[in-house]
Image (cartoon, rainbow, N blue to C red):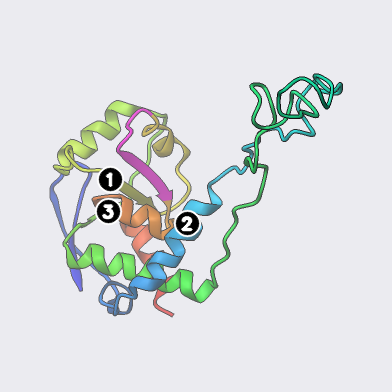
Amino acid sequence: MKLNVIDIKGKQTGRTADLSDKIFKSDPHDHSIWLDIRSVRANSRQGTHKTKSRSEVRGGGRKPFRQKGTGRARQGTIRAPHHVGGGRVFGPSPRDYTVGVNKKVKKLARKSALTYKAKDENIVIVENFSFDEPKTKKMVDIIEALNLNDNSVLILTAAHEANVNASTKNLHRISVKESVSFSTYDILKAEKLVVQEGALTKINEVFAE
């Protein structure tokens, strides 16, 4: 598969980029995509939720009233779960939500996601670019030149570009990842995929094996 390469002003460069058929025309495996996305979302959970049980709440050491003779149901503590201020029954406690995924499954999932993006013609190949300093206006100009104003966009850069990444911090629908560091969730979450030429070269090398 070949796509035309455009510059950051939205004009044709006259060059074409080769998208490996082993990646962008593979047989999509939906279950692998589901497994990888479930893993990404589960692993992003902090798991720090906590409520106090009846053994952890303050007070309630003394029996509130005598066992017999009051006409009321016997009570051992005012911090039992059915009392106001009592402990929580089966409340959440800190836990690890990590879900592991086999490396081959993760690789298959990302190839499948890229195939879907290519099939829907949602991939744009641009020449390599970098910023001397973080500048949101420059990034906005690039997105406008590529006619992607109304889309959520994932930009894959050839190398680590701290200034390019910082330039998207105030643009909630634009995100940046370095070459092959993206996840399946990153690919499918974005409506359009903007890939630098250098990033495409690395993708072809890593995923075509």
Q: Residues within 10 Å of mark 1 (few under 14, many from 20)?
A: many
Can you identify the residue that label 3 sits on? 193
Specify whether residue 171 is painted magenta: yes
Under mark 1, the amino acid is Val
Where residue 100 appears, as percent x and y from the top left, is 58, 65
Mark identifier at residue 49: none
Q: Is residue 53 left or right of residue 139?
A: right
Residue 150 magenta-drawn? no
Residue 49 location in percent, x, y? 62, 37
Among numbered discs 1 and 3, the one appearing first in the sequence = 1
Nearest the viewer among 193 and 36 is: 36
* Label 3 crowd (10 A; few <14 / some 14-19 / many >=20): many
Report crowding for label 2: few under 14, some 14 to 19, many 20 or more residues within 10 A (C-alpha): few
Report the side of 147 relative to 172 (left or right): left
Question: Tag 2's secondary structure?
Answer: loop
- The front one of 112 and 79 is 79
Give the residue at mark 2.
181
Element marked by disc 1: strand
Kind of residue at disc 3? Leu
CB under 8 Å between discs 1 and 3: yes
Q: Is residue 157 left or right of residue 95?
A: left
Residues shaded magenta: 170-177
Q: Residue at x 39, y 45 (%)?
A: 176
Alpha carbon separation for disc pair 1 and 3: 6 Å
> Measuring 24% from the left and 62% from the top, which residue is drawn there?
117
| Of 93 and 179, the residue lying toward us | 93
Residue linked to disc 1: 153
The amino acid at mark 2 is: Ser
Query: Going 15% across and 45% down the picture, which residue do you hit?
Result: 10
The image quarter containing residue 17 is: bottom left
